[in-house]
Amino acid sequence: MKSLIQATITILVVSALLFYAADALSAGGGKSGKNTLTIFNWGEYIDPDLLKQFEKETGIHVIYETFDSNEAMMTKIQQGGTAYDIAVPSEYMIEKMKEENLLIPLDKTKIPNFKNIDPYFLDLPFDDDNKYSVPYFWGTVGIVYNPSLVGDLDFSSWDDLWDPSLKRKVFLVDGAREVIGMGLNSLGHSLNSLENQELREATDKLITLAPNVKAIIGDEITPLMINNEAAVALTWSGQAADMMYENEELDFAVPDEGSNLWFDNMVIPKTSKNIDGAHAFINFMLSAESGAQNADFVGYSTPNIAAMDLMDEEVVSDERYYPSEEQRDTLEVYKNLGPDYLGKYNELFLEFKMSIR
Amino acid sequence: MNKLSASAKVYLTIVFIVLYAPIFYLIFYSFNSGGSMNNFESFTLEHYQAVFEDSRLLVILINTVIVALLSALISTIIGTLGAIGIVTVKDSKMRNTLLSLNNVLIVSPDVIIGASFLILFTMVGIKLGFASVLLAHVAFSVPIVVLMVLPKLLEMNKSLIDAALDLGATKKDIMMRVILPYIQPGIFAGFFLALTYSLDDFAVTFFVTGNGFSTLSVEIYSMARAGISLTVNAISGLVFFVTVLVVVGYYFVTSRKSKRMEGQR
Amino acid sequence: MQTKTSKSALFPYVLWIAFFVIAPIALIVYYSLLDLHGNFTLDNYKAFFTSVYLKMTLSSFWYAFLITFFTLLISYPTAYFLTKTKHKQLWLLLIIIPSWINLLLKTYAFIGIFGLYGPINAFIEVFGFDPKQMLFTDISFVFVSVYIFIPFMILPIFNSLDRLNPTLIYASRDLGASAFTTFRRVVLPLTMDGVKSGIQVVFIPALSLFMITRLIAGNRVITLGTAIEQQFLVTQNWGMGSTIAVFLILFMVIIMLITGQKDKGGRVR
C-alpha cells in the first residue's frame, strides 16, 4: 500500500515539474501575444525557418499543427474546436470543402504576390478563378524505377507495368484514385470516369496485374524504394523526388497515355479567427524568396515562377519534376466524384486488393 | 528458488534481443549523417543537436510524457476501483455485461474512438487541447487496467477477507491492508500498459487535440508523407536511455531500501 | 458483506462506462443506420453479408488466432523463466520498456531489418544462402504483431505465476508427478486466470489491427480494422465503417461469453 501511495506522489511531482519545464520552454516563443496564427499542414511540409522569419516580420505568433490525411483534416475542421487559420488540402478536397461551406473566399488585394504563380496553375476546375485557394506545391503521378533492375523497359506506357519480367517487383501506392486511375489511363479513359463499363474494364485489367504486385503500401514506399526493395513503384512525383535524392540509381517517368496532375493548396478555413494574418501568411509564402527556400527544403515542385528564377537551374529544368507544357497537357486533375462514385472506386480498389494473394 | 537452467537463459536472451532489435536499429541510424534510416553514411551528432535546438519538439515531448503519466495514473485508479466493484457483482449476467462493455474500447479501432470522442467533446463543449487529450487517454486506458487487475482479484483467497473480518477489521482496513496489497502487481501491470497505450496512440489523439497541443505520435505520423526526420530517432533514443536509467536506478534504490527493511524481519 | 464500499468504488467506473462506452456505442449504432446521403437504411447491414466482408471477417479471425497463439507460445515460458530470475521485477519492466517507443518508428525499423539488404539477409548471405523476401509475407506480419502484443501477454501471466505457492509444486513432485504432469495439473490451472486475461488483451485488439497490415503485409492481409479505417478516412462512408464496428463489438461480446468467468465472487482455493 505504501508503495502505491509513493508511486502516486512521484508521478504527480514529476508531472508538475514537467509542466513547469514545458511552460518555460514555450514562453521563449512569445506565447503571450494575442496575435496568433494557427497553421494546419502535412508534417515536414514547410521550412521551419520560414515560420520564424514570418513571426519576426509580422509579430504574429505561429502555432503549427500537422495532419496525415486530407480526410482527417477535413473532419477536424468540420467539427471545429480549433481556430485553424491556414490549411493545406489537396485539390479534390477543396471541392468537397467548398460544398460543405468550410472555406473563406480570398481577398486578392491582400495577396499582391499572387502574380508570382504560373497562370497555367490558376483557374482550374476545382476552384474557378482561385476564389478560395492558392497552389502550394504540385506534381504528377508516375513510375519510379531502377533502370538496372527492369531490363529495357522505360515506362513510356502504363502497359510496361504488366511486363511478365516484373513478377512480384511492383509497389503500388495505397490510394483508390491513383490505382484505379492508372487502370483507366492505361485503357485511354479519363481518370475521372463515371462510366461503370469503363470502371469494370479497368478493374479487370488491374486484376491481371496482380502477379506483378509485390505490395500496396503508403508513405513507407520511400524508404523501401531507396533500399531497392522493389524495382518499380507507382507513386507521386514529390515522393519520387525524395527517393531519387537518396538513391541516385532511380529514375522517374510519367507514361504518355496521361496521368494525374495534383496540387496541394493553401486555403483559409471557416474556423479562422485571424483572417488578415492568414492573408499575410499566404502573401509571405508566395514571395519569390520564400517560395524558393521552401521548394529547396521540401523538394516538391513549386508553382511560383518568380521563385524558380532563384532556384538551382538544374532542378527547374528537370522535366521529371517540371514537365514540359506538351506533357502537362496529357495530365488530368482529379474531380470530386461525389460520395457514390468515390465509394464505387474504393469498392473496386478493395476488389483488386483482395485479388493479390 | 531454483536456478535458471542454461537453456532458459538462452531463451530469455533471444526474447530480449528480439524485443530490443528495432530500438537499437533506429538508435543506430540516429547517428547517420545521411538523412534517412537506410545507407549509413558517417557518424554524426547533428540530429541530437537538432533536438535541443527545436524547442517546439521538446515541448511536444514533455506534453506526451505528462499526458502519459497522468492518464495512466487516473485510469489506474478508475480501473482498479472498477475491477474491485465488478468482482462483488453477484449476478453473473450483470458481470458479463460489465466486462463486455469494458472491452468495447479495446476492440474498437482508433479512428472510431477518435471520431466519436471528437463528436462527444464538441457536443459537451470541452475545449480541444490538453484536457480533451488527457480525458480521451484516460478513457481508452481504463479497460486494460481492469483486465490486468481482475485476475489478481479472482485468485485472491476469500478466506483472507473472512479471516480479517473475524479479527474485527473494518471495511477500510480490508481494502487498505488486504485487498490492495494483494492485487498490487496487477495494479502496476495495468499502469505500465496504460502508459504503453497512451504513448503509442496516434489516431485518437489526432482527432481530439487542438489549439496547438500535440503529442509525439501525432508529429511522427504526420511526418510520414514527406519522410520522418532522424531528429525523431534521436529524440526516441534519448527518451529510451533516460527511461532505462530511471527504471534501473529506481529499482535498485527501492530494492535496497526494502531489503534493509526485510532484514529486520 | 463488503458490498457497500465496493459498490461505491464502482461509481467512477460506471460513469466512465456511461460517457465513454455507452455514448460512443449509441453514436456508432446511429451512424450505422445512415447511408451516404444521411438517410436511414439497413443497407449497410446487408452489405456486410456480402462475400467481401465475410471473407475479411474470416481472415481477421484467422490471423487474430495465429497471433494470439504464437504470442502465448512465446510469452508463457518467458514469464515462467522471468519469475525465476534474481531481479525479476526489473526484468519484467525491461520487457515493457520497448513498447514505449513509438510504434511507427519501430515498424520502419522492422522494414529495414527484414529488407532485402537488411541485417537478417546479410546474415543469411554469410552462410551462402540467397537473400530471402521476408517483408510482405504472412510470416513477417504475424511476427511483428506478436512482437507488439508480447508485453500484454507476459504481464498477466507473470503476475499469476509469481504468487504461485512453490510448496504446491514440491508437494506434487513429492507425490511422484512428473514435471509435465505437475505443470498440466497444478501450474497451468492455477495460472488460468492470467492466461485468459492475456488472451483477451491480445485476441480482441488483434481483430482490428490495421496499420501493420499495410506497412508489414503490404495489404496482402486485409482485416476488419483496415476496412473500417478505409471507410472512415478514405471513402468517408461513416455508415459502413460504423456497421463493421458494430459487428466487431458483437464478435467481442461472443468471445467474452465463451471465455467468461462462470463462478461468482472471490474464488476459494
Image (tube, coloured by chain):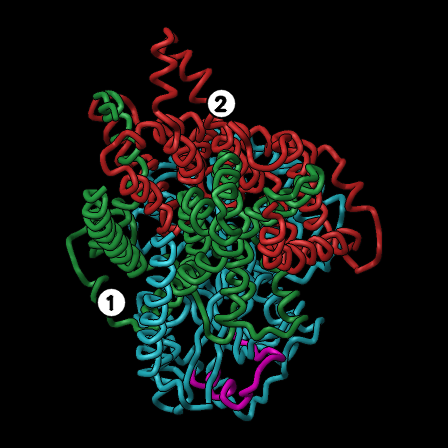
Q: Quadrant of the N terminus of chain C?
A: top right
Highlighted magenta segment, given as a residue range: A266-284
Find residue C112 and report its image quarter. Answer: top left
- Please say whether residue A272 is one of the residues in the magenta stretch: yes
Q: Secondary structure at mark 2?
A: helix
Do labels 1 and 2 touch, CB within 8 Å? no
* Residue B253 seen in the current view: yes
- What chain letter is assigned to the residue under label 1? B
Q: Colour of chain C?
A: red
Name which residue lies at 44% across and 58% down.
B73
Q: Secondary structure at mark 1?
A: helix
Task: Please say if B259 is above or below A169.
Answer: below
Instruction: Locate residue B203, reporting x and y percent.
Output: 52, 57
Question: As drawn, is B150 to the left or to the right of B62?
Answer: right
Chain coloured green: which letter?
B
Q: Colour of chain A?
A: cyan
Numbered badge on residue B50: 1
Q: Residue at label 2?
A: C189
Front position in the image: A164 or B216: B216
- What chain letter is assigned to the residue under label 2? C
